[in-house]
Image (tube, rainbow, N blue to C red):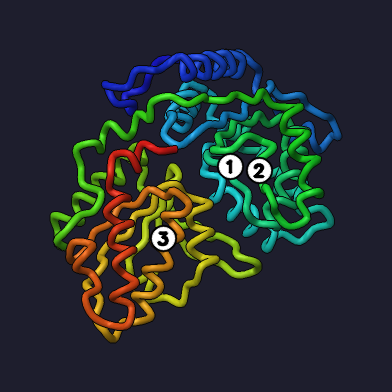
């Protein structure tokens, strides 16, 4: 498996990355020499297929998990393969559950996936929704029964998935099966290869305008390896929080979407738990009449600060000049200080 043209020329794999790459290369060789598994038809006949052992690759953000998986995915020659972000995958599963009417919807969904893919690559597995937790275990088993091979990446080790989640004890058998059926690889700490690309860039961009928009877009491209990003929905105890663009642990919002909408602490906490880097564009100078917007912005920055979230912002003025009037101007002094700290190299290097 060779490095693809999508990988920057200045990327050199470290020891941990080379180890993961070797496992991926071995699996690619197995898949490329294996006869095409007729998972759909065999499942109709009740035959259980045994796929090659898949991989669960976990480690901190920026360690190259997605880069390595993408190279692996391209190296597998079979057209029967699927690579998708975990959030988008689960949204599609929920949509299919709503559409299909049968005695065993999960089996029907597994049949459809297995008919099109003998390799399923899921990027950034992170389970924060009770509905996802209850479904993924059954679906994983059904797909393995149909001969589908899994490769997934995550920022968390398997035993940390859905930690402290509602009825987590019902999710534990899935974790046990995941560990039993996949090789768990820890991409240990090392250099975050993406940070080198933005070391010379501002992460708080002012003033607003076309140049600021272009600079934000450039940083997004560098942190997401050029991914355009897709909309996802986060589940917050039965209601949905819309994320306009998400890719590679990054999320993109406008100030309006985060602070003019009626969001609260649980919303900002959910964002910080699901994404390590948040982009917020078009932060205005706050007027005295924008007391609600100012309060939400303060709450949002406090939440992201406490969570260690990386922040890329475009704003109409420097942090200390964003809120000079209104009831929250005194409280905003701390927010301005935190915004300044969140631009520092030490903040971005922290894991």
Asked if residue 142 shows in the view, the reply is no
In the image, 192 versus 9, the foreground residue is 192
Q: Examine the image and state in which quarter residue 38 appears.
A: top right
Q: Which residue is mark 2?
A: 161
Of badges 1 and 2, the one in the foreground is 2
Quadrant for the C terminus, please. Answer: top left
Q: Which numbered disc covers residue 125?
A: 1
Q: Which numbered disc covers residue 244?
A: 3
- CB contact under 8 Å: marks 1 and 2: yes
Q: Residue at x 76, y 50 (%)?
A: 168
- What is the x, y in percent for residue 209? 14, 62
Q: Examine the image and state in which quarter residue 56 appears.
A: top right
In space, the residues marked 3 and 1 are separated at their CA atoms by 19 Å
Left/right of residue 102 with respect to residue 219 in the rendered view: right
Q: Residues within 10 Å of mark 3 (few under 14, many from 20)?
A: some
Disc on the earlier residue, 1 or 2: 1
């Amino acid at each position: 498996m060779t490095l693809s043209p999508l990988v920057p020329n200045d990327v050199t794999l470290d020891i941990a990355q080379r180890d993961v790459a070797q496992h991926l290369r071995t699996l690619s060789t197995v898949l490329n020499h294996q006869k095409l598994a007729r998972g759909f038809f065999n499942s109709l006949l009740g035959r259980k297929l045994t796929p090659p052992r898949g991989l669960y690759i976990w480690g901190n953000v920026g360690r190259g998990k997605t880069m390595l998986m993408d190279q692996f995915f391209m190296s597998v020659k079979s057209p029967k393969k699927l690579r998708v972000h975990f959030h988008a995958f689960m949204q599609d599963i929920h949509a299919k559950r709503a559409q299909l009417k049968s005695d065993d919807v999960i089996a029907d969904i597994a049949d459809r996936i297995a008919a099109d893919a003998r390799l399923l690559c899921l990027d950034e597995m992170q389970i924060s929704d009770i509905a996802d937790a209850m479904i993924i275990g059954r679906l994983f088993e059904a797909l393995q029964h149909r001969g589908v091979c899994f490769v997934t990446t995550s920022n968390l080790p398997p035993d940390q998935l859905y930690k402290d989640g509602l009825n987590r004890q019902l999710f534990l058998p899935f974790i046990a099966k995941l560990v039993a059926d996949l090789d768990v690889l820890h991409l240990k700490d090392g250099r975050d290869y993406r940070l080198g690309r933005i070391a010379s860039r501002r992460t708080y961009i002012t003033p607003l305008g076309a140049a600021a928009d272009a600079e934000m877009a450039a940083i997004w491209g560098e942190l997401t390896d050029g991914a355009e990003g897709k909309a996802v929905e986060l589940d917050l105890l039965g209601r949905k929080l819309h994320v306009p663009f998400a890719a590679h642990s990054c999320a993109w919002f406008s100030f309006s979407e985060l602070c003019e909408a009626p969001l609260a602490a649980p919303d900002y906490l959910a964002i910080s738990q699901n994404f390590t880097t948040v982009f917020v564009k078009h932060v205005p100078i706050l007027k005295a009449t924008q007391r609600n917007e100012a309060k939400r912005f303060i709450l949002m920055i406090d939440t992201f600060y406490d969570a260690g979230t990386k922040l890329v912002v475009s704003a109409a003025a420097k942090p200390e000049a964003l809120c000079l009037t209104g009831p929250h101007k005194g409280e905003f002094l701390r927010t301005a200080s935190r915004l300044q700290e969140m631009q520092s190299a030490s903040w971005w290097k922290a894991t």
